[in-house]
Amino acid sequence: SNGRSAATRQKQCSAPSPESTASRTMMMPGGRGGGPMLQPQIVLLREGTDTSQGKPQLISNINACQAIVDVVRTTLGPRGMDKLIHDDAGNVTISNDGATLMKQLQIVHPAGKTLVDISMSQDAEVGDGTTSVVLLAGEFLRECKPYIEEGVHPQTIVKAFREACALAVTKLEEISIKLDTQEEGKKREMLEKAAGTSLSSKLVSGQKAFFAKMVVDAVLAIGASQGLDMIGMKKVPGGSLQESLLVEGVAFKKTFSYAGFEQMTKKFAQPKIVLLNVELELKAERDNAEVRVSDVSSYQKVVDAEWEIIYDKLAKIVASGASIVLSRLAIGDLATQYFADRGLFCAGRVQEDDLKRVSRATGASVQTSCNDLNEGVLGKCAQFEERQVGGERYNFFSGCEEATTCTIILRGGAEQFIEEAERSLHDAIMNTRRLITNPSVIAGGGAIEMELSAHLREHSRRIFGKTQLLIAAYAKALEVIPRQVSSNAGMDPTDILNKLRMKHAHGGTWFGVDVVENGICDTFESFVWEATVMKRNALAAATEAACLILSVDETVRNPASEKPDDKNYPAMQGRGRGMGRGRGMGRGRGRGR
């Protein structure tokens, strides 16, 4: 029985079933039998869809990120180069700020946009370290690329990188220098040193001591409770950078004015201020009204009524006791002369952000009507004055008691230069504000990266498996900061890194790149200080970006979906009807666009 069943099984295995034979030898078109035919293709995605997946796709994404990193690589450090970006509209931007460059480059690669996002988030969160975060993310990807090519699973790398990031952040917190215990004088000195470090890699590095003091004064003036919008920045072309000044209070450029403006009083002590969102000028009748009259006297009544309305508004403003009238809308020649005759100062078309700062600083509330202007809605300040700054006139409100505010007036030659100075000061202000909120510092110049790299290498020797290699790769990637800083300063990166590795192996925690003497030095002693929160945020953001790109193994792109849908845009199809280049609105002869 066993022999027969074995034979039966063999026969069943060797003889194909009629169904399988039928499925393999399908009838060819025309009824003739043919050889085996391929299975019909399953159409899952729309026609024209491009799909890339697997290891080649991952390598392609890493290469795209490398190309982006290479653009901003040379801008790092005190000796970093600037980039000139000329856009379609003809605007020229000269900058070495990482976030500005990433935004202006208009990157379209989907994986590359991740680097733009982390740079922008670093700029919004901390304000400084935007180039470092892009460089770190790119270097993490560069170091793990060989492991991807050798077949290591991306999730293994992601897990190891996250573990390495957690170890690095823990070590960072351990060795950071806390400012809480320092007295007020030392705290201010430390803030100035950190602001100077932030400015040293910018275009204004030559005047970093001058601007660092200005930045700290501005940040301490508004305090931690006020928003960053309470620090205004105004640009006045001409003069030198050293002529820039910090005004304690609100300052804004003189607005467009009519005849009668020069007769106004330009200086007040203890003035009352009224803020309006009201138009104080006569409008021509044809612009906004149709008047049908039977005789000339009726028309005169209409004109008189308009004059009465505006005179009533002006009389109420004067009766309120206000000395200064600011409006977001126009103040016409009639109102200007009226106020000048009564010893008031007025300015129309004031920008909204300036009006908001005046409102918060003086306690005045913006009114949309001239009725019921009482003491409660008026603002106060110690002094108002109009002064000449370069070729422009500025209105200064100082001694505001309701809220502390300040304005930085920047001077300089070229317009692009002043704009870059503004971006540099913005980074330093953000960094200093973060330092007040999280008062701890670390040494810059690549010292902290070398110390974290040495710590992670030491840790990797105590573990086994693939994780050991991957954490060592993460440690090596951290060395990109000192390597690039030294390279941009014209030094030999290999020589500098060897010296730094030796120092950190023997306990030299704060040794970093010395770009002044072209060597290495204790950067903490040299006052190259950075905020701990900036480095912590940069490490976390760069690691997350690298892990995100490593997690993507397929890209689906459909070019057809980027075009307008024919069903929704019938005029797009062939011959247009009225929408083409035809004559008039009838049947056009041109092609639809």
Image: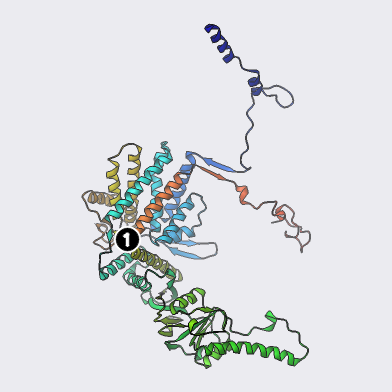
| Above or below, 342 relative to 590 | below
> Residue 91 location, x and y as percent?
51, 65
Left or right: 171 in relation to 312 = left
What amino acid is at disc 1?
Answer: Glu
- Viewer-side residue, 393 vs 352: 352
| Above or below, 158 relative to 209 | above
Left or right: 256 in relation to 448 = right
How many callouts does the rendering have?
1
For the point 74% across and 24% down, the residue is 31
Is disc 1 placed on a helix, strand or loop?
Answer: strand
| Residue 86 appears in the rendering | yes
For the point 50% across and 78% down, the residue is 365
- Viewer-side residue, 58 vs 547: 547
For the point 76% across and 59% down, the residue is 588
> Residue 424 location, x and y as percent?
39, 66
Q: Which residue is mark 1?
A: 530
- Extreme residue toward the left, this view: 506
> Residue 458 location, x and y as percent?
27, 44
- Residue 464 position by quadrant: top left
> Residue 287 location, x and y as percent?
68, 80
